[in-house]
Amino acid sequence: MQVEDSREAEKQVRTQVAIIGAGPAGLLLGQLLSRAGIDNVILERRDRDYVLSRIRAGVLEQGMVDLLQEAGVSERLGREGLVHDGFSLAFHGVLHRIDLEELTGGRTVTVYGQTEVTRDLVEARQALGRPTIYEAQDVALHDIDSASPRVTFRKDGQLYELACDFIAGCDGYHGVSRASVPAAALHSFERVYPFGWLGVLVDRPPASHELVYAGHERGFALCSMRSAERSRYYIQVPQDERVEDWSDEAFFDELRARLPSETAAAVTPGPSIEKSIAPLRSFVAEPMRFGRLFLAGDAAHIVPPTGAKGLNLAASDIRYLFDALHQHYNEGSDAGLDGYSARALARVWKAERFSWWMTNLLHHFPERDGFDGRIQQAEFDYLKQSRAACTALAENYVGLPY
Ligand code: RFL
Ligand code: PHB
């Protein structure tokens, strides 16, 4: 980054790739670009502590683990990540294990919090001395369909202009990047579910050494973890529910009521160290490129968390986008940039389908009738007796190839 004080009220800065958002997508792209010698600046609306304290996803596909390794940020992940070779589905109290490793010819997932991924990436960026501008206000994109796009923002009261070759819109669902594309150039697809997930983080050993996804007439429940000492639990709640209305005691009572008795008995309740509600949504914006702006991660698509795919899709987008930018700068070819949207969307839609399917299988839909309940039961019974059905589930859960 070069800073020139060429105008009085405005500082002008130049970089090759301007990255909007310091979530996992933006940080991972920044790390890969920096290591490849491609200059980049990250603009982030929130402060560093806020970015580092967000509790979200927990399950990494092998493809994402490999990408973090390529990015040089897998040392702690290798030490502390928990490799899972299976998980359980439960339906109305009956458990069924999905043996991921056996069904997929040896593939697994790794439980490692998004919070930890973010911390590793933030520290790696700091070690490389690359610039992240936290608390960047009024970020605005200009001339994105020209050969010289710009981003303006305010920092500590000063107005800056960042000139660049490309903009990577990695600023999540509510960011400014997707909103900067003319409405006529973007086609959105959306499904909003009439419920959310109430999540609790607790410093108690997990109920089970593997994840348990439970469908129940009272609603969905999930037992997950962050380590052998820290559990993460979720329950489905109505869309308009408020966190304040759920005491820890009420949460654990409801969780246990939805789990098979042996799993419920193994839950160790404790004081929550985090409690929040996430709405459930499926969303895709097409195309993922407009001129020199490339959308990646939640900025372009949202999946309900049931399939554990959101963070992993952010990683696969970045795999494609990094390869495309690398090709542009190192081989003088724009084939990767031109093919980025179609390539990313092909994988996105398969993950959308899987997340929608898992959500439909396991949640209680208040507005639906008895027919849907019987279909859910039949789907679960089919999984219990069909290796083919379990294989389809398992290959999606471990992640489709990049
Ligand atoms: P992020 O993480 O939202 O980061 C976007 C960043 O952009 C910043 N930003 C701006 N910066 C500058 N200017 C603006 N105008 C800006 N507007 C926003 C934001 O402050 C933020 O720092 O998007 P990214 O990087 O695309 O990453 C996506 C993932 O965070 C998300 O998909 C996952 O968390 C989804 N998810 C899960 N994914 C999985 O793969 N596996 C899981 O097990 C999983 N579990 C989950 C989840 C998401 C959940 N919630 C809370 C929705 C569980 C939950 C409960
Ligand atoms: C989590 O541990 O936060 C988690 C795990 C699996 C999911 C969603 C969230 O499907």
Image (tube, rainbow, N blue to C red):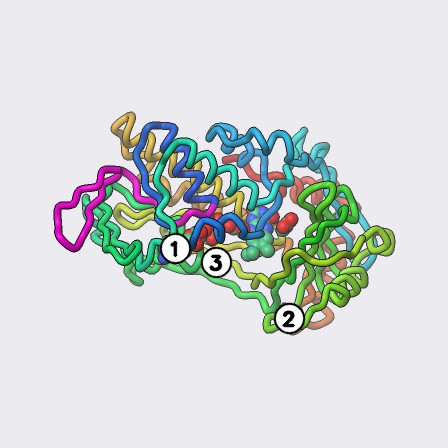
How far apart are labels 2 and 1 at the CA level? Answer: 27 Å
Camera-side residue: 145 or 81? 81
Q: Which residue is at a point 33% across and 35% down the rendered structure image?
A: 325
Q: Position of residue 129 (x, y in %)?
A: 37, 34
Q: Which residue is mark 3?
A: 283
The local crowd at label 3, few if under 14, some if 14 to 19, many if 20 or more residues have their Cα within 10 Å, is many
Q: Which mark is residue 244?
A: 2
Disc 1 element: loop
Q: Within 8 Å of ligand 1, the CB of disc 1? A: yes
Q: Which mark is residue 45?
A: 1
Name the residue at the top extreme.
331
Q: Which residue is at a point 70% across and 55% down the rendered structure image?
A: 233
Q: Which residue is at a point 78% across and 56% down the rendered structure image?
A: 269
Disc 3 element: strand
How far apart are labels 2 and 3 at the CA level? Answer: 28 Å
Where is 151 relative to 279, above or below?
A: above
Question: Mark 2: which amino acid?
Answer: Glu
